[in-house]
């Protein structure tokens, strides 16, 4: 059918729009595809350049417990252990504080306080990690050395987790810095999911005579739990890959930490410290291999978190009505 | 007995309320201390000449020597250049990807892009530096440490953030606006660019501003790309300094005047973030008010 | 209900995913008259008129089957943008472009489509605002933001915006459902004037409104056309039992 048979007296549309729409569609689709391409580009660069280390060690790299530059022996366990340990500390400390704050923000805080407090938490998330690291190096670390760690050693030293010299630049300090950094992530998203609990749920509990806390515990938290879980995994993702703050506080020692007072190294801090001054192609390739492991872990964690959160906070904007 | 039980429940509720409030206060302590220390240590150093002067010779005041203050001019300049270039690369790509994800929604590819961008924002920023370094070290080793690689590394971080924030911004525009334009026979590209985009402009600018601030604060991706330099801009093929790099390098130095400059740099970053977040809040408020017709 | 109207719908079905929202509808809308489509909510009346300017297909996972002839040409076969220039639409809720002034809203179709002189655009804006019975109220402040108008004024602005493009058919999807009675009365009298120039098709859930403004009325139920005819006949001598039950308020 010929479009020109449709004619209108005054406003005649430009013929260019068909091409305009087509070109526009191709351009934006291209940009979209580029975003997807980025993931593959990142993975393929890491895979090709970790080849040498992979050929030498295979998957045994993942269980190699030594990283010895002078003997050219490279295993990833010290860094995987450091990464998991610091992240675990971060979640153990950060999770309760973040959830507590999120609950406070959604149900307990007076209304006038909620907005400003929410913004402050966002601000906490926006502070650059190198600034956290700097603060950790100058204030948190020395405070840990002189005050917190001696107390821990005295009271909990028998557990073995707090043995060794209290230096303040160790796995524990890095974990605490990470806790401070993951709290805003966990708190902000948990708050969002708590706020998304339908009012009817709360009112049902209130009408049964529940106290404030009982409403939160029975109606709010269970309803929001998969969102809170997603938020926590997202926080974990941030902790696993955090670089500057950890590099500046963990002590940078290529060995498996034996206590929370040990100096250690995470995968991220290993990369920051050794990528540009590796002693040879094998070490370089091993570092890239470690980066590939970090990428795989964080992809896994982030995909899991996003799948959870997408279900909870389903994107609904832009629909009719 | 019954009353006793009720009183206990009430008390418990009070205790838990108190605990959640304590959590909220606890998480504010580090923020308060960081800002306090940055103001205390960086504030006195901060001046116009610090913003423009070159780095000083390393020095610590022993035996009554007065140390030169110097400045962070090169780092400030470097951050400005890197962030501006990275924004120039990532804003068009991120915005266009967001347009595809939102305006062509309902298609598998659109959802896939949204999801990928979401996941990419969670990938450690140090990885962005690693891949740019790893690529250039093989294919163009002469510019491994340069403005170019620094820009690219920051772009890898900023593109997904801009995609996500612009997506959210575009979603705030009601679908009825798009339908109104389509029903007038306005082509889709004009509808998108001249009506939807314009309506969401404050939110889009805010998103861009926030991702630019994120880029300005990143050190990890620049460690192996921009690398840092004691000089200002020396051409696109040469290393350049940035505020976060300066903080990292000077923080671990033993020289007092360098450490003070690092605090000054930290203070500047914090102030920039404060200003950006206030600005974005105002912009969003204005947009919401306008949509309501106030 | 066949015959040769300005806009002729033949065996039209429309889908959301697998769900069929309207099933095999055929009817003709006569030129320069007001036709109303009534029916309980969810009966497919909005979907039907959203097919008439090909807006239905802009939603994800939707599909249309059948033919829609505008002056004998199947609009499903031609460029949708050309169709929408000839078939204008007014929506349930007033949806002026928030970032634009009154003037810019009305002139948007002309400014974004085709080249028109400033003078042409000015004249089109004044004409459309007059046709929409809004000109007297806004002539001193056409540069004011569109959102500064009241709800009823905003809806008339949307009508003016649609008219500025000089469509031949004007679709109205429950144009008064978000308005108060006074604003509704204004729109209704406007609709009666518009039929001198345009072919108007109005969807409404308000039977009294259909009775007041429409020359012909179609009754839809569960996606099917139950009855279609002159409004008077449909309301006073319904042929179908279902129609009678609906207009006497026994369901819907």
Image (tube, coloured by chain):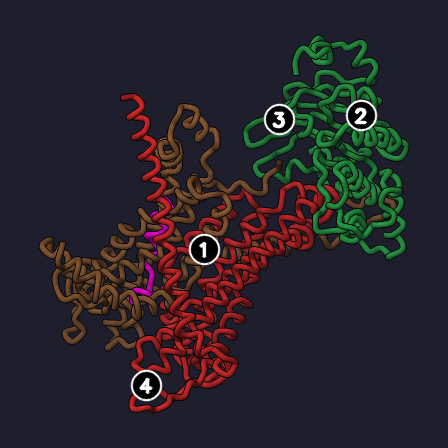
Chain colours: A brown, B red, C green
Q: Quadrant of the N terminus of chain B?
A: top left
Q: Would you say residue A246 sits in the magenta stretch? A: yes
Q: Would you name the residue on which mark 3 appears?
A: C21
Residue at 70 percent across and 48 percent down: it is: C98
Q: From the viewer's perspective, is B105 left or right of C109?
A: left
Q: Chain of mark 3?
A: C
Using the numbered discs, state the Cα–Cα distance from disc 4 to disc 3 in whole angstroms. Answer: 80 Å
Q: From mark 2 to mark 1, how far is it between C-alphas?
A: 57 Å
The verdict on residue A17 being magenta is no
Q: In this figure, which residue is indicated by the disc labeled 1?
A: A120
Indicate the position of residue C37 as horizontal and vertical percent values.
Answer: 74, 24
Do badges 2 and 3 share one subunit? yes
Badge 2 marks a residue whose secondary structure is strand
Residue at label 4?
B60
Judging by the rendered image, the residue that carries numbered circle 2 is C35
For label 1, the SS is helix
* Tags 1 and 3 touching, CB below 8 Å: no
Q: Is residue A47 above or below residue C31?
A: below
């Amino acid at each position: 059918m010929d479009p020109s048979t449709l004619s209108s007296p005054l406003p005649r549309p430009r013929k260019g729009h068909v091409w305009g729409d087509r070109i526009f569609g191709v351009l934006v689709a291209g940009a979209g595809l580029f975003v997807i391409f980025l993931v593959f580009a990142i993975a393929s660069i890491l895979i090709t350049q970790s080849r040498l280390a992979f050929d030498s060690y295979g998957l045994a790299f993942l269980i190699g417990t030594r990283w010895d530059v002078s003997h050219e022996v490279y295993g990833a366990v010290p860094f995987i252990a450091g990464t998991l340990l610091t992240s675990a500390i971060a979640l153990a400390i950060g999770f309760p504080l973040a959830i507590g704050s999120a609950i406070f923000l959604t149900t307990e805080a007076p209304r006038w306080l909620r907005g400003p407090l929410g913004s402050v938490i966002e601000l906490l998330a926006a502070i650059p990690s190198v600034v956290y690291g700097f603060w950790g190096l100058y204030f948190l670390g020395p405070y840990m050395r002189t005050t917190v760690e001696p107390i821990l050693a005295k009271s909990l030293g028998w557990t073995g987790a707090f043995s060794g010299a209290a230096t303040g630049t160790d796995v524990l300090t890095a974990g605490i810095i990470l806790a401070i950094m993951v709290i805003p992530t966990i708190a902000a998203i948990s708050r969002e999911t708590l706020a998304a609990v339908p009012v009817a749920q709360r009112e049902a509990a209130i009408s049964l005579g529940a106290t404030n806390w009982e409403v939160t515990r029975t109606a709010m938290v269970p309803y929001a739990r998969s969102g809170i879980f997603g938020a926590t995994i997202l926080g974990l993702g941030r902790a696993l890959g955090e670089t500057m703050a950890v590099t500046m506080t963990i002590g940078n020692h290529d060995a498996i930490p034996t206590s929370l007072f040990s100096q250690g190294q995470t995968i991220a801090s290993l990369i920051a410290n050794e990528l540009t001054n590796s002693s040879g192609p094998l070490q370089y390739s091993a570092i890239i291999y470690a980066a590939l492991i970090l990428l795989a872990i964080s992809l896994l964690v982030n995909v899991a978190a996003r799948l959870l959160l997408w279900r909870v906070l389903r994107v609904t904007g832009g629909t009719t009505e | 007995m019954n009353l006793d039980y009720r009183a206990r429940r009430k008390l418990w509720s009070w205790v838990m309320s108190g605990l959640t409030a304590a959590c909220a206060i606890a998480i504010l302590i580090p923020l308060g201390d960081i800002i306090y220390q940055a103001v205390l240590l960086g504030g006195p150093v901060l001046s116009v000449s610090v913003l423009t002067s070159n780095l000083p010779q390393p020095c610590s005041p022993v035996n009554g020597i007065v140390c030169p203050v110097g400045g962070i001019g090169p780092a400030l300049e470097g951050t400005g250049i890197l962030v501006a270039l990275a924004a120039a690369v990532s804003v068009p790509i991120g915005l266009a990807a967001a347009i595809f994800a939102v305006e062509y929604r309902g298609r598998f590819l659109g959802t896939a892009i949204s999801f990928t961008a979401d996941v990419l924002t969670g990938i450690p920023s140090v990885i962005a530096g690693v891949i740019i370094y790893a690529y250039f070290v093989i294919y163009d080793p002469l510019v491994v440490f340069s403005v170019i690689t620094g820009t690219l590394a920051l772009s890898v971080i900023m593109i997904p953030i801009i995609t996500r924030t612009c997506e959210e911004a575009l979603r705030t525009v009601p679908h009825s606006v798009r339908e109104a334009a389509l029903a007038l026979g306005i082509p889709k590209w004009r509808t998108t660019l001249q009506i939807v985009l314009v309506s969401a402009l404050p939110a889009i600018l805010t998103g861009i501003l926030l991702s630019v601030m994120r880029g300005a604060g990143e050190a990890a991706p620049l460690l192996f790309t921009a690398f840092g330099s004691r000089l200002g801009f020396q051409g696109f093929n040469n290393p350049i300094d940035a505020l976060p790099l300066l903080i990292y390098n000077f923080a671990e130095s033993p020289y007092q005047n360098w450490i003070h400059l690092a605090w000054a740099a930290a203070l500047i970053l914090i102030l920039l973030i404060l200003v950006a977040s206030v600005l974005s809040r105002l912009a969003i408020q204005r947009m919401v008010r306008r949509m309501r017709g106030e | 209900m066949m015959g040769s109207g300005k806009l002729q719908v033949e065996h039209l079905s429309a889908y959301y995913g697998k769900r069929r929202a309207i099933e095999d509808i055929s009817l003709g809308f006569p030129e320069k008259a007001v036709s109303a489509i009534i029916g309980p909510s969810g009966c497919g009346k909005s979907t039907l008129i959203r097919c008439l300017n090909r807006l239905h297909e802009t939603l994800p996972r939707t599909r249309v089957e059948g033919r829609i002839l505008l002056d004998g040409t199947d609009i499903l076969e031609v460029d949708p943008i050309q169709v929408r220039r000839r078939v204008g639409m007014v929506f349930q809720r007033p949806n002026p472009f928030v970032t634009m002034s009154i003037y810019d809203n009305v002139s948007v179709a002309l400014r974004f489509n085709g080249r028109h002189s400033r003078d042409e655009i000015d004249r089109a804006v004044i004409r459309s605002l007059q046709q929409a019975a809004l000109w007297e109220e806004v002539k001193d402040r056409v540069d004011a933001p569109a959102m500064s108008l009241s709800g009823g004024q905003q809806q008339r602005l949307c009508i003016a915006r649609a008219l500025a493009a000089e469509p031949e058919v004007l679709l109205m999807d429950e144009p008064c459902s978000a308005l108060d009675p006074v604003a509704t009365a204004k729109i209704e009298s406007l609709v009666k004037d518009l039929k001198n120039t345009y072919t108007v098709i109005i969807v409404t859930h308000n039977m009294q409104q259909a009775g007041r403004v429409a020359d012909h009325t179609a009754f839809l139920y569960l996606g099917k056309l139950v009855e279609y005819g002159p409004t008077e006949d449909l309301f006073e001598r319904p042929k179908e039992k279902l129609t009678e039950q609906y207009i006497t308020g026994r369901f819907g």
